[in-house]
Image (spheres, rainbow, N blue to C red):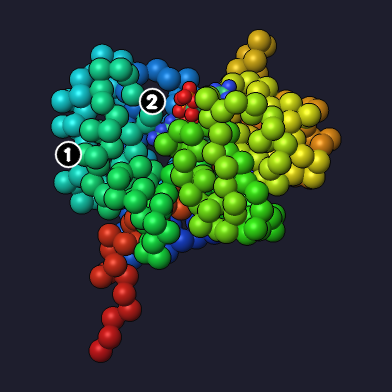
Amino acid sequence: MIIDGKGLSNRLDRNMKIEVQALKKRGIEPKLVVIIVGNDPASQIYVRNKHRKAVKLGITSIIERRPEDFTQAELLALIYQYNQDETVHGILVQLPLPKQIDETAIIRAIAIEKDVDGFSPANVGRLFSNSHEHYPVSCTPKGIMTMLSHYQIDPAGQHAVIVGDSNIVGRPMGALLLNAGATVTYTHILTADLPSFTRTADILIVATGVAHLIKAADIKPGATVIDVGMNRDENGRLVGDVDYEHAKDVAGAITPVPGGVGPMTITSLMQQTLELTKVANRRTLKPVKV
Ligand SMILES: NC(=O)C1=CN([C@@H]2O[C@H](COP(=O)(O)OP(=O)(O)OC[C@H]3O[C@@H](n4cnc5c(N)ncnc54)[C@H](OP(=O)(O)O)[C@@H]3O)[C@@H](O)[C@H]2O)C=CC1
Ligand SMILES: Nc1nc(=O)c2c([nH]1)NC[C@@H]1CN(c3ccc(C(=O)N[C@@H](CCC(=O)O)C(=O)O)cc3)C=[N+]21
């Protein structure tokens, strides 16, 4: 089975569009700011697709592009400006950042109620302690959980193996799966004999940025394989971290690249922007009691 992230994302978008219209009728305009510093190629695709989707849904999207030599002090000033701007509900700073900028300091500077990526320590803490509150979580793992749920793949009691331990994808993905009842194994660059782990996965999540790292022989027959990777092959085509052509015959369900995880990441970002907008306008949105 091919997991159609793009198709699911389009279906979810239709509902969101209606929700945005309803908010606007009440005078509330969801607004997202994306700050991109430098020229990271994956970030460029993300920014372009994200802006298109926001326009399609009626969400206001502001893109702030800054050059590779932008300083940390300048970036902090830009974030503070949007923290204070009450018309803005979500702030996203594209990662990775150029090396002169300390990512931790930048993530900490974003107001937690506008942290649409869920990267701030407070929101990460809520995720890892399985808090019952509403809080934003990293958009890519969130989109993957939505996909699993729509395809009726229940992680409870399953062995989930995560390949790649980044703060954007691998780590929050493991936490979400653990919260959903999976037995979670994290693997990373120092893992000895990676295939010995991936072959035991009922749910395999691959997020390394290494094209074709996972071959058909590394997959347990019938497993669900989620490919987060976005790489260019020698012909300039977008490919994942999984050798899709061969893996699809072994896996029970698999996501393609493109058309799998990517579109769902963007849909999650839009869902989370709407959530933050609603929380910011809690009082206005409550039914008025007489
Ligand atoms: N489709 C989507 O929505 C998204 C796609 N992406 C894509 O997913 C990929 C991963 O992104 P991200 O998590 O941000 O990347 P990072 O580069 O931050 O993290 C990659 C992780 O994989 C590990 N790793 C690298 N090589 C190997 C290996 N051979 N075996 C095991 N682990 C390895 C790295 O270890 P170490 O750091 O120690 O080297 C690191 O933990 C990229 O291709 C990116 O473009 C990312 C976000 C969203
Ligand atoms: N703060 C931050 N948050 C992120 O979530 C974040 C980030 N920084 N930096 C970069 C990575 C990368 N990322 C992508 C998301 C969707 C597609 C996407 O739309 N993919 C389409 C591509 C299709 C195409 O246009 O070619 C697909 O897979 O079908 C790509 C890349 C989010 N990231």
User: Mark number for residue 96?
Assistant: 2
Identify the image quadrant of residue 32.
Answer: top left
Residue depicted at 41% across the width and 52% down the height: 128
Coordinates of residue 106 in the picture (x, y in percent): 25, 33
| Circle 1 or circle 2, nearest the eye | 2
Q: Which three-letter amino acid code belongs to the residue tagged 2?
A: Pro
Relative to 21, is 2 on the left or the right? right
Q: Nearer the viewer, residue 167 or 181?
A: 181
- Residue, disc 1: 80
Q: Mark 1 or mark 2: which comes first in sequence?
A: 1
- Classify 192 as above or below 62: above
User: For disc 2, does the CB lie below 8 Å from ligand 2?
Assistant: yes
Res 63 visible: no
Q: Nearer the viewer, residue 284 or 134?
A: 134
Coordinates of residue 287 in the picture (x, y in percent): 33, 79
- Classify 135 as above or below 3: below
